[in-house]
Image (tube, grey):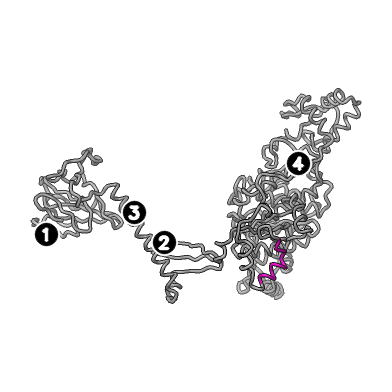
Amino acid sequence: MEVINGELLKPAGEEKLGIKATESNGVVDKEIIKTRYGNENLSISVHFSPSSNSNVNQDDPAGDTTKPEDIIAVTPKINGYRQTIQPDFHLPKPEAPPGLSPSPPSQPYENGDAVARSKSLSESFTAVDMPSIGKFIKERSNSLSERISKRFSSLKFDDGDDDYMNNKVKSFDSGVTEFKISGLKVVVMLKSNDEEEQIKGRVSFFSRSNCRDCTAVRSFFRERGLKFVEINIDVYRQREKELIERTGSSQVPQIFFNDKLFGGLVALNSLRNSGGFEERLKEMLGKKCSGDAPAPPVYGFDDHEEESTDDMVGMVKVLRQRLPIQDRLMKMKIVKNCFAGREMVEVLIHHFDCGRKKAVEIGKQLARKHFIHHVFGENDFEDGNHYYRFLEHEPFIPKCYNFRGSTNDSEPKPAVVVGQRLNKIMSAILESYASDDRRHVDYAGISKSEEFRRYVNLVQDLHRVDLLKLSQDEKLAFFLNLHNAMIIHAVIRVGCPEGAIERRSFSSNFQYIVGGSSFSLNTITNGILRSNRRSPYSLVKPFGTGDKRLEVALPKVNPLIHFGLCIGTRSSPTVRFFTSQGIEAELRSAAREFFQRSGMEVDLEKRTVYLTRIIKWFSGDFGQEKEILRCVINYLDATKAGLLTHLLGDGGPVNIVYQDYDWSINS
């Protein structure tokens, strides 16, 4: 930087604010400059007057002392860019160079003094202010855009540079190409084929849950990158009638290109093998579909179903209006929202013109249908000063996520029918919103889907179902499916806790009303499926003596349930749903998949078997460790089974180490 006639000139290619010292009341210590500006991200350049006799190295201001009039400018660099920074308050206060008018005071110094910033009147001198910073950012972004465009162009036309492609471009089977450009990562999604841009119509197909042919059609469309509309007639049951009208049968899958019936999986395979699929697709979908094509499912509209009204609903409505429902003192406890048995008998006699004996019998029927319950579960219904409450007034209601303001007063459907519908709708959800191996679930997508909205409506049918009519296999499948469905619902509503301690409250507080009682994730697992056994690290059983839910608990534990229960974590078994007809075979398949994936590893040299921590937590269900290993062999692949058989057969010691558990969500 030079001084000519008292004015500061800007070197070519740089923008900095020069400050001329005019006071010379001492010497300037270079350590002060270094202390104020010197750090790992900032370097200092001190510019001296050409007439200065100083012998100080200009690149190192921390040497000898120099008079203030010798210093023209102090220009720091932060991260490589020159910045304008106010001089230290120890330095003499600068004045504006001749010809420049002072601007309003800038930020005060540390000692309270302010310095006036100069303002340029020349177009050739630009101060470092916000507009120039914005201009700098804009120029940098334009430069970056040009570099990205050039790099894409080189990737498109320079096919011969193998080393460049190997180092800079990474291609994936999914059609995603990754570019790495000077520290910037750019991911470009490439279309699978050119015909996709020309498709104006709609591909749709009718399906059912758990249908292998439907899965094959779905996978084919996904692999081709084709958008399609799936109409699952297990979810949208009214659409089955439309399917029969269009095709003459209810057989699935049935594929439509616009309003034209294409056929099923056989027709799709035939056209794919002949190589004419793209041409046929382009031909049939070259124009927008008409209103005659199968309509996509619409969110928020339920199928009209005739619900049979419970024949006792009329009595219940009268009782809700006439009974004196209030808080009472019973056994030294305040019992909320209850009424006495004799009070209900009096209302029934008065309003329905029946005798006392008949009124008591009506009360027992209402209790069996779960309209009312004894406050302590001591009896069904009796006349006298026994206290009862309506189901909607139970204290567990606020924790029940399938309660939506009122109980379902329709005639209860059979529990096995509700369980089958739950299986089908949740299977349809997984087919659309989970990976093919079911290890990853799109909870956000599920929460916005029409299928999940219908599931939330469906679980209200659980309020008053009769669980005692379920067989053992039906009960096992029913509660396994209910648990896995509740996990998905719980993750969507309250999130997935990461850790064993947080998981305890999560498992206890998320509940459903099922058959007039509350069931949490914990009570389903340990109370029903494990025959009322203590959960890990718990001192009490889920159900106490006299709990009505004990009547529903399974008589013995099937240890394979632990490989069918998903709790929404990466280390838990994959989420699946079961049928009562094939529950045993399906549980064995679940165990086989779990152990072959990551549930067990064998290190022959160290004579160590690494087992899932689930077995440690529920060791009482599996037996002794050696018995566990012999049992596990039945679910391993040939390699692991051979290694484990060798360890168990040579008579040497076998070490068992339990794997760490990954509590992160399986999304």
Query: Is 592 drawn above or below residue 48 in the view shown?
Result: below
> Image quadrant of residue 401?
top right
What residue sits right under mark 1 in the picture? 55
Query: What secondary structure is found at the residue carrying circle 4?
Result: loop
Observer-side mark, 4 or 1, equals 4
Q: Give the alpha-carbon distance from disc 1 to disc 2, as whole Å.
A: 45 Å
Q: Which residues are magenta?
A: 261-272
Query: Is 667 drawn above or below residue 654 in the view shown?
Result: above
Q: Nearer the viewer, residue 660 or 112?
A: 112
Checking the image for residue 138, the label placed there is: 3
Magenta span includes 47: no
Q: Give the alpha-carbon distance from disc 4 to disc 1, as whole Å.
A: 93 Å
x and y percentages locating residue 573 in the rendered image: 67, 59
x and y percentages locating residue 253 in the rendered image: 72, 61
Query: Is 386 drawn above or below residue 96 in the view shown?
Result: above
What residue sits right under mark 2 in the picture? 184
Q: Give the alpha-carbon distance from disc 2 to disc 4, as whole Å.
A: 55 Å
Q: Nearer the viewer, residue 340 or 261?
A: 261
What residue sits right under mark 4 in the picture? 463
Q: Type of residue at label 4?
A: His
The N terminus, quarter of image: bottom left
The C terminus, quarter of image: bottom right
Q: Give the alpha-carbon distance from disc 3 to disc 4, as whole Å.
A: 62 Å
Q: Is residue 403 left or right of residue 149?
A: right
Q: Is residue 184 left or right of residue 327?
A: left
